[in-house]
Amino acid sequence: MKFKGSPEFTHKQNDKVGVLITNLGTPKAPTAKELRVYLKEFLSDPRVVEVPRFIWWFVLNFIILRIRPRRSAKSYKSIWTDKGSPLMFHTRHQAEALQKNLQADWGDDLVLDFAMRYGTPSIASVLDRLLQQGVRKLLVLPLYPQYSASTTASTFDALADQFKKRRWLPELRFINHYHDFDPFIQAAADHIRHHWHAHGRADKLIFSYHGIPLRYLHNGDPYHCECYKTSRLIAEALELAPDEYMTTFQSRFGREEWLKPYTDETLKALPGQGCKSVQIFCPGFAADCLETIEEIGVENRAYFLSSGGDHYEYIDALNAEPGHIDALGQLIRQHLQGWEIEHDTEKRNRLAKALGAKV
Ligand SMILES: C=CC1=C(C)c2cc3[nH]c(cc4nc(cc5[nH]c(cc1n2)c(C)c5CCC(=O)O)C(CCC(=O)O)=C4C)c(C)c3C=C
Ligand SMILES: [Fe+2]
Ligand SMILES: [Fe+2]
């Protein structure tokens, strides 16, 4: 059979609305072996590395996958907890909290689950589970506030690959971005205000986003503009003057030029320009992960302090904190409009009998 069907379907099954939240994915364990598996899948995605395939195949397999897994495993070991990878447990907590938040008005009509673009739980396995539960309308929310082809479109590709293989497709809605969604902006501003209340303020607030190659911006990726807009809106909510905050880009990979200003170079230069204390928040990361905890929390702290800075604070990602869950709940509700389910069991049974089907 060419297309995967839903043989377990019965006419008694209630239709449900499904919400699938996704994030990037993380290795299964902080070992070179598991990193090799994870990096191979991630870096083989043509949305992530836009280089001719035959050249990239050699570079990836003969250079990168021989060096990077061991190096990255060391970094992952430093952030690994007894609950596993931070990205995984924060995403799981977000899913649990969002399910509760939405159940308040959707009850059992809605099921929410989470999947990872790379690694596990895979989009394929979670999609199977949702469809088996009777999901006929599916809303997908990739937890990337700013759209980029390397993340958001890649998630869409993975879904589309699954749909190509299946017989009975659900209705689909896909949230492209939420970089300027007011409840998200207010949740970020409240979170920073809360941090100020507990720790005081610094000379500058830095908004650091994951970078992408500059070439992707020139080829039409809106990510750069969306990052700047998020920064501006959070800064406006916090009533910051333009010289009290800045936007930077972190996590470069490879030798080509990426979006600038680079976070690490900025932090090395700031003390020499008279800025001795900074606080850093990463509005593009819905959950703390290697790139925030280690790169911003540890590595860049060392750059700033060893360049003459006095005080450096990393402000946690929004993770599963109530303000964030409430904002995401509002975003999901907005995109679910019109999908409320009719509870007409009698009508469904009558129709099924008329068709001679098992009910
Ligand atoms: C090779 C190019 C990469 C692009 C382009 C890229 C874009 C991009 N990534 C994120 C979010 C995350 N990236 C994370 C890790 C990570 N990213 C890359 C490379 C690119 N990312 C690598 C090789 C890695 C693995 C770690 C390492 O070996 O250095 C993570 C963390 C995952 C975790 O397990 O904690 C996140 C999250 C965004 C948002 C983005 C483009 C906008
Ligand atoms: Fe990345
Ligand atoms: Fe721009």
Image (cartoon, helix red, strand yellow):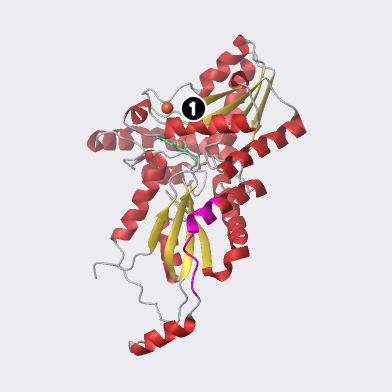
Say which quarter of the image contains residue 63: top left
Is 48 rendered above or below residue 3? above
- Residue 108: x and y in percent read 56, 70
- Residue 7: x and y in percent read 35, 76
Q: Nearer the viewer, residue 148 or 85?
A: 148
Residue 340 within the segment the image draws in magenta = yes
Apparent side of residue 7 relative to residue 32 in the rendered image (left or right): left
Residue lying at 62% horizontally and 13% vertically, measured from the top left: 271
Q: Nearer the viewer, residue 238 or 81?
A: 238
Residue lying at 39% horizontally and 77% vertically, measured from the top left: 8
Number of numbered discs overlaid on the protein picture: 1
Magenta segment, which residues? Answer: 331-342
Residue underneath mark 1: 249
Residue lying at 31% horizontally and 40% vertically, measured from the top left: 46
Residue 7: in sight, yes or no?
A: yes
Q: Nearer the viewer, residue 251 or 163?
A: 163
Helix, strand or loop at mark 1: strand
- Residue 195: x and y in percent read 71, 34
Is 60 rendered above or below residue 83? above
Quadrant in which ligand 1 is drawn? top left
